[in-house]
Image (tube, rainbow, N blue to C red):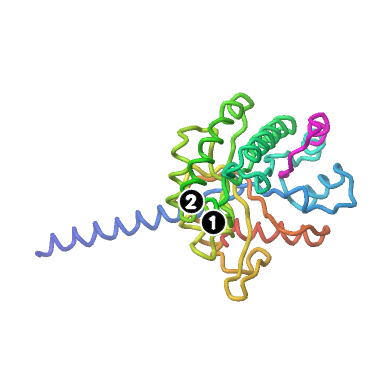
């Protein structure tokens, strides 16, 4: 290599290094405030009225609420109105689906599960939420993995027209149900529906025993509709407060920025008073600031 070639090579390498560094800086400097902090309704003090709960959530720095299915849709509408008035709109309905899983071999249980899911969709519409969380299936001693996949897929497909009509996304979550045990499977499960009304609800803490949250986030990418925040400590096998376990929050935040996530971050933790909730809000602020 002659001198001129060497200089060009060094110059090109320096440019490339600068470009990469600048790109990395851009990722780091993207506005984390696009991600909004929320609380589950059950995390607020039970002795307070609903309007008082919502005002407290706002006072502690939260911007949204995740509520639960309600049979009385008029009451659900009032709940949504009160939340919006306090500045913490209801963004999601946490239905679940453990009691009557759509993978159940008993058709009567599946039918009950479908009716409860449909009610959760109507609750979401009434409160102003845009998403319903669903545990899609449960693998058991008597329900195999393939059966859970095929049954739940077929049953969820029946409800998607109603979800579309109401404008509500069904977001399936990764939980400890022995199902969707890798990010590749999770992505495939969502993709097979070929519908914008079926997306992913990713729980950061639920994968720590057998994976890394940032890997799941990057693999699921734009499929992620909502995020649950939890932290888990492998040594001692225990759930802990945010930033006290083995979740790599710096990498989680980086991954969320990379995929352009701009939705709610909702911790799924125990209830507490104003001091506890303010501290929790500050912990999420620290995560958004870099981990």
Quarter of the C terminus within the rendering: bottom right
Do callouts 1 and 2 mark residues in contact (Cβ within 8 Å)?
Answer: yes
Where residue 47 appears, as percent x and y from the top left, is 90, 52
Left or right of 87, for residue 181? left
Real-space CA distance between mark 1 and mark 2, rounded to the nearest whole angstrom: 8 Å
Mark nearest the camera among 1 and 2 is 2
Q: For the residue labelled by badge 2, is the local secondary structure a helix, a strand or a loop?
A: helix
Q: Nearer the viewer, residue 161 or 166?
A: 161
Which one is in front, 159 or 7?
Answer: 159
Check the image and name the residue furthest to the bottom: 235
Residue at 87%, 46% in the rendered image: 52
The residue depicted at 75 percent of the width and 59 percent of the height is 270
**Residue indicated by mark 1:** 178
Residue drawn where x is 79% and y is 39% of the image: 83
Q: Which residues are magenta?
A: 64-79
Q: Which mark is residue 145?
A: 2
Q: Position of residue 87 (x, y in %)?
A: 76, 40
Crowd class of label 2 (few under 14; some 14 to 19; many from 20; radius 10 Å) = some
Q: x and y percent of residue 216 in the render?
A: 48, 54
Q: Residue 74 lies in magenta, yes or no?
A: yes
């Amino acid at each position: 290599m002659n001198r001129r070639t060497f200089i060009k090579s060094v110059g090109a390498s320096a440019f490339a290094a600068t470009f990469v560094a600048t790109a990395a800086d851009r990722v780091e400097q993207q506005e984390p405030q696009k991600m909004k902090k929320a609380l589950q309704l059950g995390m607020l003090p039970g002795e307070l009225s609903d309007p008082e709960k919502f005002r407290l959530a706002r006072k502690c720095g939260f911007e949204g609420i995740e509520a639960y299915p309600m049979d009385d849709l008029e009451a659900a509408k009032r709940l949504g109105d009160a939340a919006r008035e306090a500045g913490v709109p209801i963004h999601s309905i946490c239905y679940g689906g453990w009691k009557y899983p759509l993978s159940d071999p008993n058709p009567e249980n599946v039918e009950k599960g479908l009716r409860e899911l449909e009610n959760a969709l109507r609750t979401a519409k009434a409160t102003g939420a845009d998403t319903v969380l669903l545990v899609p299936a449960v693998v058991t001693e008597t329900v195999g993995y393939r059966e859970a996949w095929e049954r739940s897929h077929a049953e969820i497909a029946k409800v998607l027209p109603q979800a579309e009509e109401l404008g509500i996304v069904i977001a399936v979550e990764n939980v400890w149900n022995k199902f969707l045990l890798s990010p590749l499977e999770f992505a495939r499960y969502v993709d097979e529906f070929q519908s914008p009304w079926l997306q992913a609800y990713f729980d950061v803490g639920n994968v720590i025993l057998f994976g890394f949250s940032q890997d799941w986030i990057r693999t699921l990418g734009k499929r992620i509709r909502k995020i649950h925040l939890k932290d888990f400590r492998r040594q001692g096998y225990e759930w802990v407060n945010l930033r006290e376990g083995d979740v790599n929050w710096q990498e989680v935040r980086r991954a969320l920025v990379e995929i352009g996530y701009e939705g709610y971050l909702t911790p799924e933790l125990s209830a507490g008073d104003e001091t506890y909730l303010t501290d929790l809000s500050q912990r999420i602020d620290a995560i958004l600031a870099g981990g």
